[in-house]
Image (cartoon, grey):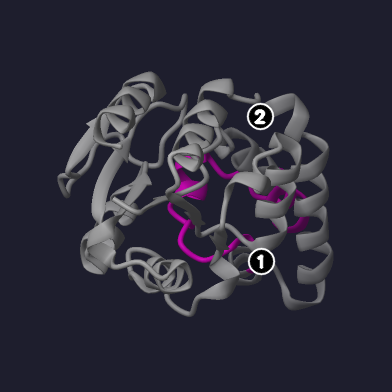
Amino acid sequence: MKAVLFDFDGTIADTLPLIFHAFRKVFSKYTGRTHSDREILQMFGPPEKEIIERHIPPKQRKQAFRDFLQLYDDKHREMVEHNPDIEKVVRLIKEKGLSLGIVTGKGRDSANISLRHLGLARFFDVTITGDDVVRPKPDPEGLLMAIHRLDVRPTDAVYVGDSNGDILAGRRAGTGTIGANWMSVSQSDGFSVQPDHIFKDIQSFSKWMQSVL
């Protein structure tokens, strides 16, 4: 193993409740509709800007996206706790000499906001966001881009994620796959495509990483 790649929302950070909150506020303001968490989750795939463009009238899209980012930033400290166990495991991987990357469907702006609030940017060698790809997960485009930039073979990398799309993307890219079910809210209740490993808590994942490094 030479590289560990992570999804972000629901894997690195417990950001899904914040995302639901920000989208719900924006959609309510600009469309008058109140969406459930499940309805918002079904919109996932493209980055936030594209989701807004699909659901909000053209003249209001730019301001709606600004509002989303402002809500996401303003509420981040309140709604997303810093998880020392996550920082501990990424620090461990880094200290063992492996490359670290993020491959996420979220946009570059919101990814940077979260990495700034959580103080995690310094650990990652590459971050591929939904703004960097044409085809979102489960297409492997983002993973293959990260692998290329890290100059490793797919078989020397593992991808850690909380959704079926993450596991499918990893399979299609040729990486190992790890299902993460350690956050309060995940994108998938279970995995329809079986990952190579599933971990219910970050401590178990950390122990496994120590055993294979």
Q: Nearer the viewer, residue 192 or 152?
A: 152
Q: Is residue 181 in the magenta section?
A: no
Number of residues whose C-alpha sits closer than 10 Å to that of mark 2, classed few (under 14), some (14–19) or many (20 or more): some
For this view, does 126 lie left or right of residue 206? right
Instruction: Tell me if mark 1 has few (under 14), some (14-19) or many (20+) residues whose alpha carbon lies within 10 angstroms of its own.
Output: many
Asked whether residue 30 is drawn in magenta, I would say yes
Q: Which mark is residue 90?
A: none
The residue positioned 17% from the left and 46% from the top of the image is 192
Which x, y percent locates residue 107?
Answer: 63, 61
Q: Which residues are magenta?
A: 25-49
Q: Is residue 201 above or below residue 171?
A: above
Position of 3 relative to 71 (above/below): below
Q: Residue at x 45, y 27 (%)?
A: 183
Q: Position of residue 150 (x, y in %)?
A: 45, 66
Q: First in sequence: mark 1 or mark 2?
A: 1
Disc number for residue 80: 2
The residue under the point 36% across, 21% down is: 201
Between 159 and 185, the one lying in front of the other is 159
Per the image, the residue denoted by label 1 is 49
Spatial CA span between label 1 and label 2: 21 Å
Residue 109 falls left or right of residue 123: right
- Frontmost residue, 16 versus 144: 144
- Residue 196: quarter of image: top left
Viewer-proximal residue, 156 or 205?
Answer: 156
The kind of residue on which mark 2 rests is: Val
In the image, taking residue 178 as reference, residue 134 lies left or right, namely right
Q: Residue at x 50, y 75 (%)?
A: 133
